[in-house]
Image (tube, rainbow, N blue to C red):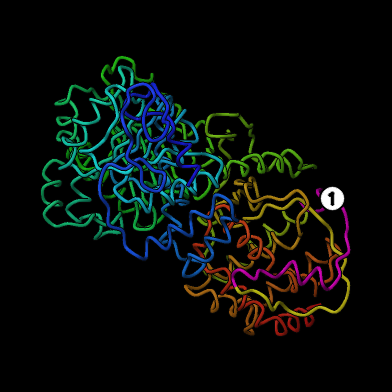
């Protein structure tokens, strides 16, 4: 626990002295410690959490991915992992970027990731929790991910800090608890400091959002009733003003049952609200978000929308006059798995698209995207987004201009005619792209092919056998070539976006394979049924699939049997990258790969019939 002790060597009673033999050399105060963490309350931890924490503590020195694989009950289990690594739910901090400076304090119901992510941009970050177990785990994970937090074992009533000692205080609490938390925060806030207050609104507390898939209500029936009464903009504002703070910004946070804080925007932003309610975009086309649109339109007509958001982010200061001029007033944020997108508006239309990495460990994906798109050659490069990379406190941010055309997922239908049409359009683009962007040809031995298709961590250890050396080109690959990443106009691909999974010397079959496999997933509610429909069953769908594969192989000069051999390669790559950056899977790709392998002999035979 030495790292934790070192992290807290500054006296938290005065912030002037250092700790020697558990006492401050300046103020003389003794610092009570437990497991190297300043502790001001008693604790009782569950045996289960204690075991998990002890395992996570090894992340400081051991491979964090290996440790997490032992903790997960399954490669899709996010029970523990998401508390630390589901970074998309904390992307709201991008809307308060100008306030994130100096010394920070994290209190309330925040998950562990919030303190870790804030520590990436703040000079120092103190996180408070009543659980010593989770504090130990949080500190260890922070160290493993290249940053550090200063854990404090305390409740809100026992904080040891001196007055005016924090520049940023992040609070996540219920509406009924605001007065208690804010009365403590104003004592600890510096003169120019900022309180970031996250509070559920009455639609969330009352359970209405849970009925329509827009976020489940918190626990505790009595607290839900109490919080529903004041869980609106007026009630929250009143509580903030009562402690002498003003409101610099007020943002709405919209969630789904799958993802907290999926969309965020300043409630004063008419362009953002107009886009949310009326715009056509891939990020607002799911059923829950369509419900948000419908309910918001009703509330807007009644002029009560500001009081009806399910969750709020209040940016609070002593003097509202020093708040940011606020370019975010004309923006809306959409949280993504690894990067979040900020759309900026001009005259009611999207003018700039800003891709912000959700964490520093995910920031290389923006650099990866820029490097790949910069390397693309030939006329096909005109179908890539106009973009540039800018370094910020959050890492490299990618700025793009809007693209033309309509996303494929808005055009594609579950009909043979539609599938036949759009496979041809996309494969024509793909052939031209790969012909212009082949890096080199390489040979792979059977052992190397087997290694390419094996991931022991998720049980993929028995790929189709190959007993000959293959020859294959290395090309620039996209890595996520489907649906909303492909824009089409006049029967041509006009733009391909979102290149974060790209490789500059990748397997050429990854992109056509991913496209066809995702197409199979779209054709049925069950992947296995969709795969059999497109690749196995005797029907027109199968014919058009194999004819396009054959044409692709002929144009790229790849043996069709190699295409089928590497058909699952795109999913293999996605598994590896998701486990690396997100520490778990949210789609059961291994199960899909197993189905592809089970049908290998059949698909090889069917392709031979065409060939």
| Callout 1: SS | strand
Closer to the camera in the image, 396 or 56 = 56
Q: Which residue is mark 1?
A: 439
Residue extending farthest to the front is 21
Q: Quadrant of the C terminus?
A: bottom right
Within the magenta stretch, is there residue 188? Answer: no
Residue at 29% x, 37% y is: 171
Residue at 29% x, 48% y is: 130
Whether residue 545 is visible, yes or no, is yes
Query: Is 3 on the left or on the right of 230, as rendered?
Result: right
Question: Which span of residues is magenta-colored?
Answer: 433-458
Residue extending farthest to the top is 321
- Quarter-wise, where is residue 567 in the image? bottom right
Q: Residue 366: x and y, percent?
A: 61, 40
Query: Is 77 on the left or on the right of 235, as rendered?
Result: right
Q: Residue 12: x and y, percent?
A: 35, 30
- Quarter-wise, where is residue 26 in the image? top left
């Amino acid at each position: 626990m030495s790292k934790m002790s070192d992290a807290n060597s500054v006296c938290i009673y005065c912030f002037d002295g250092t700790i020697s033999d558990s006492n401050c050399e300046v103020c003389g105060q003794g610092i009570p410690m437990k497991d190297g963490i300043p502790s001001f309350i008693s604790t009782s931890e569950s045996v289960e959490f204690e075991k998990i924490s002890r395992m996570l503590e090894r992340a400081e020195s051991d491979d964090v991915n290996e440790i997490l694989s032992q903790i997960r009950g399954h490669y899709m289990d996010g029970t523990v992992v998401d508390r630390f690594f589901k970074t998309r739910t904390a992307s709201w901090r991008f809307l308060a970027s100008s306030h994130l400076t100096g010394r920070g304090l994290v209190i309330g119901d925040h998950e562990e990731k919030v303190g870790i992510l804030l520590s990436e941009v703040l000079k120092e970050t103190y996180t408070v929790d009543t659980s010593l177990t989770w504090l130990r785990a949080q500190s260890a994970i922070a160290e493993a991910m290249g940053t550090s937090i200063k854990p404090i074992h305390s409740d809100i009533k026992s904080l040891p800090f001196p007055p005016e000692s924090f520049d940023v205080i992040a609070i996540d609490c219920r509406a009924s608890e605001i007065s208690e938390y804010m009365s403590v925060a104003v004592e600890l806030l510096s003169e120019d400091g900022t309180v970031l207050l996250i509070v559920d609104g009455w639609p969330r507390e009352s359970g209405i959002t849970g009925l329509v898939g827009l976020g489940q209500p918190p626990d505790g029936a009595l607290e839900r009733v109490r919080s529903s009464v004041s869980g609106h903009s007026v009630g929250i504002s009143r509580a903030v003003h009562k402690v002498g703070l003003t409101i610099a910004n007020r943002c709405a946070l919209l969630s789904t049952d799958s993802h907290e804080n999926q969309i965020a925007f300043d409630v004063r932003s008419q362009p953002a609200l107009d886009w949310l309610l009326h715009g056509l975009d891939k990020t607002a086309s799911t059923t829950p978000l369509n419900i948000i649109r419908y309910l918001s339109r009703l509330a807007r007509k009644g002029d009560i929308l500001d009081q009806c958001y399910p969750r709020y982010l209040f940016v609070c200061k002593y003097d509202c006059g020093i708040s940011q001029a606020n370019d975010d007033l004309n923006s809306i944020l959409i949280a993504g798995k690894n990067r979040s997108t900020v759309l900026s508006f001009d005259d009611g239309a999207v003018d700039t698209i800003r891709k912000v990495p959700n964490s520093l460990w995910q920031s290389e994906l923006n650099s990866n995207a820029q490097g790949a798109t910069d390397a693309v050659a030939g006329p096909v490069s005109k179908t890539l987004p106009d973009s540039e990379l800018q370094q910020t406190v959050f890492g490299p941010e990618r700025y793009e201009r809007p693209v033309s055309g309509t996303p494929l997922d808005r055009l594609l239908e579950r009909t043979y005619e539609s599938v036949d049409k759009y496979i041809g359009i996309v494969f024509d683009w793909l052939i031209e792209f790969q012909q212009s962007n082949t890096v080199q040809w390489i040979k792979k031995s059977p052992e190397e092919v087997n290694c390419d298709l094996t991931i022991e961590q998720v049980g993929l250890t028995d790929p189709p056998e190959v007993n000959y050396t293959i020859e294959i080109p290395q090309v620039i690959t996209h890595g996520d070539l489907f649906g909303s990443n492909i824009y089409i106009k006049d029967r041509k691909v006009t733009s391909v976006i979102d290149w974060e999974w790209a490789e500059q010397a990748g397997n050429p079959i990854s992109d056509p394979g991913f496209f066809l496999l995702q197409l199979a997933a779209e054709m049925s509610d069950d992947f296995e049924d969709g795969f059999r429909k497109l690749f196995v069953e005797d029907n027109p769908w199968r014919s058009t699939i194999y004819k396009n594969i054959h044409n692709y192989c002929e144009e790229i000069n790849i043996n069709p049997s190699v295409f089928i051999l590497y058909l699952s390669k795109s999913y293999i790559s996605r598994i590896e990258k998701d486990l690396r950056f997100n520490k778990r899977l949210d789609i059961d790709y291994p199960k899909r790969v197993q189905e592809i392998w089970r049908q290998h002999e059949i698909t090889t035979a069917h392709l031979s019939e065409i060939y």
